[in-house]
C-alpha cells in the first residue's frame, strides 16, 4: 500500500453505504483532523473487558485467540473463574496492541486495573495477579504473598495520582492493601489525554477520563468495530498500528485514484543492465544461531550465551514467548507460530527447525 503521510484519515465500514458516508465526511471536513507529524505517546488504561466481548474478538482475531490460549495453558487457577478470565482478556488485548505497533510508554488503571497494568509492566507475574484478583473476589481466604519487581514500563497509579515511584512499586503492601483505595485515576493520566498523547482503553473503567481515549465506535457497536475504530484513531494520530494480520485472511487490493497534482509526463533514461545477483536467503548454521541468541537476549532481557538452554529455563511467561516468536518471524521474514517455538525451545533445535522449513 501507500506509505503513511502526516495528514491521514481512516474510515471503518462494514458496507458500501457506510464507507461512502465516512469518506464524504472526511472530504467535507466533518471528521476529526489530527496531524500525524510524529508518533504520539501511548498509554494503556486497564479496566474491565466484558467476557462476551472478548469471546467475540477471540473468534474474529486469530492473534487474540493464540495469545489467550498460551496464557490459559499456564494459568494456575481455573480459566473458568472470573478473575482468570479477566486477566486473560486484559493481557491478550494489551499484547495485541503492543505487538501491532501501539507500544505503551506507560500503563495504569484503578484497583484491579492497576494490578493488571502492573502485571503487563512486569511488576507482578500472572500467578500473583490471579491470586490478588481471586482474593479480592473472595475466592481465597487471605491476601497472597507477592514479590514485586522493577517495572519495565512506568505504572500510572490511581493511588498516588501519577507515576508509581519504584520503592512503592516494590512494596508488597501497595498491592495487597493500598491499590484498592485509589481514587485519583484522572489525575494519574493527567496530560496523557490531550494533544500529543493517546490513551488506549483495555476495557471500560468506572471513572471516565477526559479527552479522546476510546473505545471508539459507540457503545452499541460490536467489539470488532470498536477495536477497528480504535486502530483507525491511533493510526490517524501517527501511531504505527499494523492490523494487516488481524483477520487471519489474505488482504484484498483495491484500486485507488492517483494523486491529481501534476499532469506532466516525466521520463528517465533506461538504466544500465546490472548482472543478476545471487538470491539472498535467510541465515543458516552458526550465523542463524548467533542471530537467534541476539533476539532471545533482547526479548527475554537475559543474556543468552548457550545454544542448548531451553526458553523454559529462562522465563516461562507465555506473553514473552509470543513476542519472541513474532520477533524472530519478522527478522527472518518467515511465519513462526508460537507453538513451533515451544516445541523447539532451544536455539539449537529452533535453528534446525527453521532450516528445515525455510
Image (spheres, helix red, strand yellow):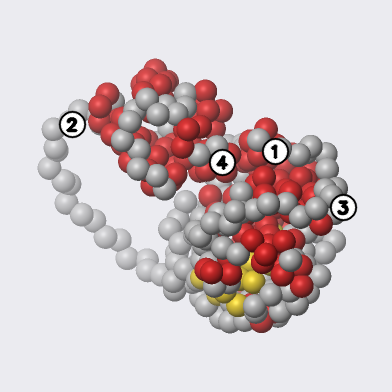
Disc number for residue 138: 3
Q: CB of mark 3 within 8 Å of CB of mark 1?
A: no
Mark closer to the observer (2, 1): 1
- Mark 4, Cα crowd under 10 Å, few <14 / some 14-19 / many 20+, is some
Image quadrant where residue 268 sits = bottom left
User: Which structural element holds mark 2?
Assistant: loop
Lower position in the chain sequence, tag 4 or tag 1: 1
Spatial CA distance of label 3 from label 4 is 26 Å
Spatial CA distance of label 4 from label 1 is 10 Å
Q: CB of mark 4 within 8 Å of CB of mark 2?
A: no
Spatial CA distance of label 3 from label 1 is 18 Å
Lower position in the chain sequence, tag 3 or tag 1: 1
Residue that mark 2 sits on: 277
Residue that mark 1 sits on: 75
Spatial CA distance of label 4 from label 2 is 43 Å
Lower position in the chain sequence, tag 4 or tag 2: 2
Mark closer to the observer (4, 2): 4
Q: CB of mark 2 within 8 Å of CB of mark 3?
A: no
**What residue appears at the point 28 percent right and 34 percent down from the top-left corner?**
290
User: Which structural element holds mark 4?
Assistant: loop
Residue that mark 4 sits on: 317
Counting from the top left corner in percent of width and height, residue 28 is at 64, 77
Lower position in the chain sequence, tag 3 or tag 4: 3
Amino acid at each position: 500500500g501507500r506509505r503513511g503521510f502526516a495528514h491521514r484519515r481512516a474510515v471503518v465500514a462494514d458496507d458500501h453505504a457506510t464507507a461512502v458516508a465516512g469518506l464524504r465526511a472526511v472530504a467535507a471536513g466533518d471528521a476529526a483532523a489530527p496531524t500525524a507529524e510524529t508518533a504520539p505517546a501511548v498509554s494503556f488504561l486497564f479496566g474491565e473487558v466484558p467476557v462476551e466481548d472478548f469471546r467475540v474478538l477471540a473468534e474474529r482475531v486469530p492473534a487474540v485467540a493464540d495469545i489467550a490460549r498460551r496464557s490459559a495453558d499456564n494459568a494456575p487457577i481455573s480459566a473458568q473463574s472470573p478473575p482468570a478470565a479477566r486477566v486473560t482478556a486484559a493481557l491478550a488485548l494489551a499484547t495485541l496492541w503492543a505487538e501491532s505497533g501501539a507500544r505503551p510508554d506507560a500503563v495504569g488503571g484503578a484497583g484491579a486495573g492497576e494490578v493488571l497494568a502492573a502485571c503487563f509492566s512486569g511488576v507482578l507475574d500472572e500467578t500473583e495477579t490471579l491470586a490478588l484478583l481471586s482474593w479480592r473476589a473472595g475466592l481465597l481466604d487471605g491476601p497472597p504473598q507477592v514479590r514485586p519487581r522493577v517495572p519495565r514500563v512506568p505504572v500510572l497509579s490511581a493511588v498516588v495520582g501519577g507515576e508509581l515511584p519504584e520503592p512503592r512499586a516494590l512494596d508488597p503492601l501497595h498491592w495487597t492493601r493500598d491499590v484498592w483505595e485509589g481514587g485519583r485515576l484522572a489525575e494519574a493520566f493527567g496530560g496523557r489525554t490531550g494533544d500529543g498523547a493517546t490513551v488506549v482503553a483495555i476495557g471500560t473503567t468506572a471513572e471516565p477520563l477526559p479527552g479522546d481515549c476510546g473505545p471508539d465506535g459507540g457503545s452499541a457497536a460490536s467489539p470488532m468495530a470498536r477495536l477497528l475504530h480504535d486502530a483507525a484513531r491511533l493510526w490517524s494520530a501517527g501511531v504505527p498500528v499494523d492490523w494487516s494480520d488481524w483477520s487471519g485472511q489474505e488482504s484484498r487490493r483495491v484500486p485507488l485514484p492517483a494523486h491529481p497534482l501534476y499532469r506532466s509526463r516525466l521520463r528517465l533514461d533506461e538504466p544500465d543492465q546490472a548482472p543478476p545477483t545471487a538470491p539472498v536467503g535467510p541465515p543458516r548454521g552458526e550465523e542463524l544461531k548467533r542471530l537467534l541468541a541476539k533476539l532471545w537476549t533482547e526479548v527475554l532481557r537475559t543474556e543468552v550465551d548457550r545454544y542448548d538452554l531451553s526458553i523454559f529455563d529462562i522465563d516461562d511467561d507465555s506473553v514473552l514467548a509470543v513476542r519472541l516468536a513474532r520477533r524472530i518471524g519478522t527478522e527472518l521474514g518467515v511465519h513462526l507460530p508460537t507453538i513451533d517455538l515451544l516445541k523447539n525451545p532451544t536455539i539449537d533445535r529452533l535453528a534446525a527447525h527453521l532450516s528445515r522449513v525455510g
